């Protein structure tokens, strides 16, 4: 039986999953969140990148709900979940390098 992730950690620009007892495993090319059920707000909590910034990078309208599931938003606006992963990875990189900082 596979372990269920207990927590999400952001270390540098890699997102890892915690399986309890101090054990961490890298989340390979994916965020340690359920892509269909997670929301932009969940991504914000996991990465520190504001949900509105992620939405903007995806080209979503300003009226989009930050608590809507990514699966629902994907169906409504026609983006791929990989685009979310790529956008968040790029935003994390930019944050670390100071690009876009005020």
Image (spheres, rainbow, N blue to C red):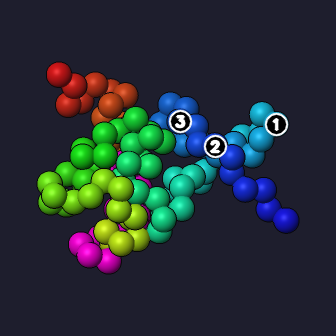
**Separation of residues labelled 1 and 2 (CA atoms):** 11 Å
Contact, CB < 8 Å: mark 3 with mark 2? no
Q: Are marks 1 and 3 in contact (CB under 8 Å)?
A: no
In this view, the residue in front, 99 or 69, is 69
Residue holding disc 1: 21
Relative to residue 90, is residue 12 drawn left or right? Answer: right
**Residue topped by disc 3:** 10
Q: Which residues are magenta?
A: 75-88
* CA neighbours of label 3 inside 10 A, class few (<14), some (14 to 19), many (20+): some
Residue 29 visible somewhere in the drawing:
no
Pointer 1 local density, CA inside 10 Å: few below 14, some 14–19, many at least 20: few
How many numbered marks have been drawn onto this rendered protein structure?
A: 3
Instruction: Give the residue at x 47% y 36%.
Output: 13
Q: Residue at x 22, y 60 (%)?
A: 64
**Residue 7: assigned label:** 2
Where is residue 73? Give x, y as percent: 31, 68
Taking the view exactly as shown, the residue that stands out farthest to the left is 62
| On screen, residue 93 above or below 98 | below
């Amino acid at each position: 039986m596979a372990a269920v992730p207990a927590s999400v950690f952001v270390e540098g620009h890699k997102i890892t999953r915690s399986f309890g007892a101090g054990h961490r495993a890298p989340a390979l090319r994916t965020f340690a969140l359920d892509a269909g059920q997670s929301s932009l707000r969940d991504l914000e909590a996991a990465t520190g990148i504001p949900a509105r910034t992620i939405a903007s990078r995806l080209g979503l309208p300003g009226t989009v709900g930050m608590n809507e599931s990514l699966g629902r938003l994907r169906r409504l606006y026609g983006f791929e979940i990989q685009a979310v992963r790529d956008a968040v990875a790029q935003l994390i990189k930019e944050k670390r390098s100071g690009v876009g900082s005020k």
